[in-house]
Structure formats: C-alpha cells, structure tokens
Amino acid sequence: MSVTRENILAELDRIQLPDGGSLVSHEMVRALSVEGGQVRFVIEAANPEDARKMEPIRAAAVKLIEELPGVDGVSAVLTAHAPAQSAQKAPPQKAPAPDLKIGGHPKPQAAKIKPAGVKRIISVGSGKGGVGKSTVSANLAVALARAGKRVGLLDADIYGPSQPRMMGISGKPQASADNQLLPPEAYGVKVMSIGLMLEEGQAVVWRGPMLMGALQQFLTEVAWGDLDVLIVDLPPGTGDVLLTLAQKSELAGAIMVSTPQDVALLDARKGIDMLNRLEVPLIGLIENMSVYVCPKCGHEEHVFGQGGVEAEAKKIGAPLLAQLPIDLETRLGGDEGRPIAAGPGVMSEAYQRLAGRLIEAGVI
Ligand SMILES: Nc1ncnc2c1ncn2[C@@H]1O[C@H](COP(=O)(O)OP(=O)(O)OP(=O)(O)O)[C@@H](O)[C@H]1O
C-alpha cells in the first residue's frame, strides 16, 4: 500500500502541541514530499528558540510516520524563520561574516539580478531527486575551471545542500571589506552554499518569499568577482527555486540531468515543460548513470534502462550533451570532497569533453 500526503498529514495532526493545537493546525508542516516510501518534511517554528524546544515533537512525528504502512524512511527537520544569531558558534574567522539573514524576505527589486562580473548564469536541474544533478554540477564546474574558465558554483539545493561535501569545503564564509560574503574556492571554482551558513546537522527550509530572499542574497551579496559562468545547482523538481531564478535573474540557459529510468524521465519532461513556459533556453540533456560497466569483465549492465534520455533528447530536439556511466570513483570522490573531474581517468575525460562541448558551442 502506498502512503499519501493526506495519510501523513492526518497522522501529524494527532500530535498535540502544548497549546492544544497540532503541527497541522498551526501550519507548521512544510515542504512535505512523499516519493515512493520516502517521506520528507520540515517543521517550521516561529523562531530558533521554539525550534530547539520542539526536538521531542520532531522525534515523535518521525516515529509516528515511520510506523505507517508503506513508509520506508522519514526525514524531518526542524527549522525556524531565520537562523539564531546568538546561539550559533561560528568557527574562528578573520573578519566577521556579514549579517546575512539568509532566508529573509526579498528586497524590492526592479531589474533582473545578475552579479555585475558574471557573464552568464546556467542552471543544472533534474525532475527527480538523486539522479546525480549535484555530482554533475560540481564536476562540470571543475572541468570548466580546468579548461581555463572562471567558474562559480551556487548550491541552490536549499533543501539538501551537498556542494560543501562534494567540493570538500567547510567553515563559514569570510566577509569582504564591503561586507560581502567571500565564496571559498576549491578546485579553481568559487563555491557558495546555504550548507556553509548552517551548523552541522541544522536544516533550514523557507516559505516561497524567504526562498526568493535567500536566492537574491546569494546573487547580490556574494563577492563572485568576474566569472565566465555561474553554475546553479537547483533542487530537484519544478519548484520555487527555478521559478525564482528564471523570473528574478538573467538565466542564460538550463541543463537537465536524468537517468534513463522511466520515472526520472517523466519528471525531467515536467521540468522541461516548466523551462519552456518560463522561456528559459534548454541547453541540453545529460544522461547520468546510463550504464554500469563491470570493472572485472567489461560487461555492460543498463541498470536504469537504456537509451531513454537519448530518445527524449531526439524527440524534443535538444542536444544530448553527455552519457555518464555509473562509476564507483565518481561516488567516492563526491563523498570525500574530491570531484572526479579534478583528477585523471576516463570519467574526468568525459567531464572535460562535456565542458569542451559547451565551450565550443559558445554556451560558456
Ligand atoms: N555517475 C555516477 N556513478 C555513481 N554514483 C553516482 C553517479 N552520479 C551520482 N552518483 C551518486 O549518486 C548519489 C546522488 O547523487 P547527487 O547527490 O549528485 O544527486 P542529486 O540529483 O543532486 O540528488 P538530490 O536530489 O539529493 O539533490 C550520490 O551518492 C552520488 O555520489
């Protein structure tokens, strides 16, 4: 039996808060997603102090949902409207970080935002989570830097920022003299991520306007300097972030990552529809985890199906930019903060070809 959003909300409504209301009646359940048996949601408290006190409620909510038939895993995070200023222990730093209340409401803005020195902004998205969009973003950024381009990588996967881990970066960003956030650099790429602004294990999820505020800040209050390209790693799906980016910034184009699996493709199609509606040019598709090649015997196994992304690209008349196999070193490199594209080997060469192709096509 598959579990639905309604089942989840009905269960969460049973958890009483001290004032007699529930998480649901107080509209504290946010970003609820049910994918297969995986349930993810956020409990949004009014302020950081309340959020801290609500840990037992979060734990009770997880326990309750885990017991529902059809649920394989539950991830619930507590968040508040803005990170606490006083209680956070920042690592030692040379200059104090600017008071960026990341996630605040956006400031009114007439024109579209593109940081002054940034030539173009390109998004990397996927319809479905877990298809390797962040891996591709990180490695593409590194390969472009190796090809001599000035590259920035903005982790806009605000619900699950993974670029600090993938690029091997930690610690809060420093502030520049004019109170801008200085993006740390790794493998020749300037990186900024909400993950760098949070304490370990802390998660923040915002309502639409707060999300727009965060993105606006990442575009305007980070000292990106002169860049040939700013690659934006989007959260999966066709949600608020792409919409905000397309409407509020000058998005030069989008790359869509998918596995050949039907469900990933179906979701990618929805993402492409959204790009069309927003009039964002689709630069091309990347098929990730296209095939598994046995390192011992060379046998090829099409774990997620075969040819799906290529057929889709043909159908919609978009370039298939790369077909990247399942590769253990790619995963290990991502987990250890050493992007595969930074070293030698066939996968690194594949990313260099991808970067070369985009440069030759004049996309970057
Ligand atoms: N070609 C590949 N071969 C092997 N493992 C891969 C490959 N691409 C990605 N992975 C691994 O798959 C997992 C998911 O990748 P990644 O986090 O990049 O996906 P995502 O689409 O950004 O996911 P999310 O929806 O969580 O943001 C990671 O462990 C990553 O190392």
Image (cartoon, grey):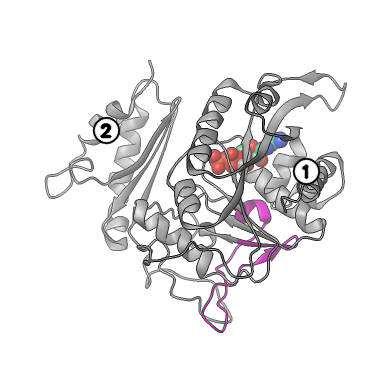
Q: Is residue 230 above or below residue 267?
A: below
Q: Which residues are magenta?
A: 163-191
Looking at the rendered structure, the kind of residue marked 2 is Leu
Position of 22 with respect to 315 (left or right) is left
**Residue farthest to the top?**
1
Q: Is residue 82 above or below residue 343?
A: below
Q: Please name the residue that numbered disc 1 is placed on.
A: 354
Q: Residue at x 23, y 43 (%)?
A: 23
The N terminus: image quadrant? top left
Looking at the rendered structure, the kind of residue marked 1 is Leu
Q: Is residue 117 above or below residue 340?
A: below
Q: Is residue 80 magenta?
A: no
How far apart in space, not on screen, are marks 1 and 2 (Cα)? 44 Å
Q: Secondary structure at mark 2?
A: helix
The C terminus: image quadrant? bottom right
Q: Are marks 1 and 2 in contact (CB under 8 Å)?
A: no
Front-most of 26 and 278?
Answer: 278
